[in-house]
Amino acid sequence: MVANDPGQPTLSSDAAALAAGATIDLDAPGCVLAIGAHPDDIEFGAGGTLAKWADAGCLVHHLVCTDGSKGTWDPHADTAALVQRRQVEQREAARILAGERGRDQAGETIFLGRVDGELENDAATRSEVVKIIRTLRPDVVITHDPWKRYRLHPDHRNTGQLVCDAIVGARDPHFHKDLGLTHHRPTALLLFEADLPNHAEDVGATLDRKLDALLAHESQFESTMRAAGGDPDQLDAFRVRITDRLAELGAPWSLEFAEVFALMVDL
Ligand SMILES: [Zn+2]
């Protein structure tokens, strides 16, 4: 890396080592599978990237591992109703990200349905994710970085590990033969919440769609957006916070707005 090259990111020393081959903007894949622990995680981590790729003709699939049943501050909430509501919100968010493509050929939105907070990277769950990867056959998989340091939420950590392990299970023909499905090797894995980002996606053109998709998760207005009752001023403040964050992420890469990832290829 050339120290004063404005096109290169400015990163801490260990990050710089990893980022020696740092890249900006993959070619839009034909098919992507985004996998999140909870409804709204995918939109936070990669919503702008997914919207951009959808506009380029990419088929975007969503897989949500848990039911989101802990996603409320109301101790008396009807959590069964919350689960149903969050599925509706997730489908709407996926439709927004799919944009024009979503009108005629949106990807699938799949719910693994594990209890929020209790996701395990166990054999049965891995088999389910392998089955989905071998069925949908994505070129790119996107999920949480399981190696993110100092993260508390077990579902985020476990989703990342589950997906990494499931990619190995999906790509090698002698794994999961019981599924009766042809093995499949994606060409790239993008990890959001990256501990050491080495890749950025320019999301300047789709920032608004990412924000709109996030705000489709109305059940999260109080706990996530800090906008109890959908207070318009607080929702605007949320949009500003996310916009500022994407600008902050983009600055080292000379991008106005970016989502950043750990990119793994040669899977
Ligand atoms: Zn989450």
Image (tube, rainbow, N blue to C red):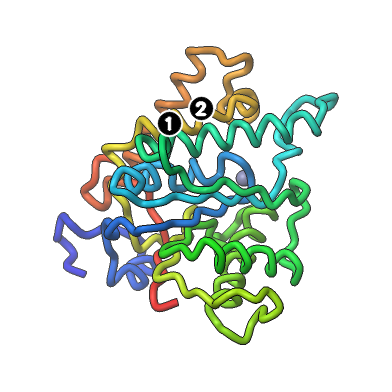
Q: Is residue 152 left or right of residue 168?
A: right
Total number of numbered labels?
A: 2
The residue carrying mark 2 is 215
Say which quarter of the image contains residue 146: bottom right
Nearest the viewer among 209 and 76 is 209
Circle 1 crowding by C-alpha within 10 Å: few under 14, some 14–19, many from 20: many
Residue drawn at x 40%, y 47% as measured from the top left: 50
Circle 2 crowding by C-alpha within 10 Å: few under 14, some 14–19, many from 20: many
Residue drawn at x 64%, y 65% as measured from the top left: 162
Distance CA(mark 1)–CA(mark 2): 6 Å
| Percent of width and height locating residue 196 | 43, 63
Q: Amino acid at mark 2?
A: Leu
Say which quarter of the image contains residue 123: bottom right
| Percent of width and height locating residue 128 | 68, 64
Q: Amino acid at mark 1?
A: Leu
Q: Is residue 183 left or right of residue 46?
A: right
| Percent of width and height locating residue 43 | 49, 41
Nearest the viewer among 63 and 199 is 63
The local secondary structure at tag 1 comes to: helix
Residue drawn at x 71%, y 78% as measured from the top left: 178
Residue 200 position (above or below residue 183): above
The residue carrying mark 1 is 211
Residue drawn at x 31%, y 43% as measured from the top left: 55
Respond yes or no on whether mark 2 lies under 8 Å from ligand 1.
Answer: no
* Residue farthest toward the left in the current orientation of the protein: 5
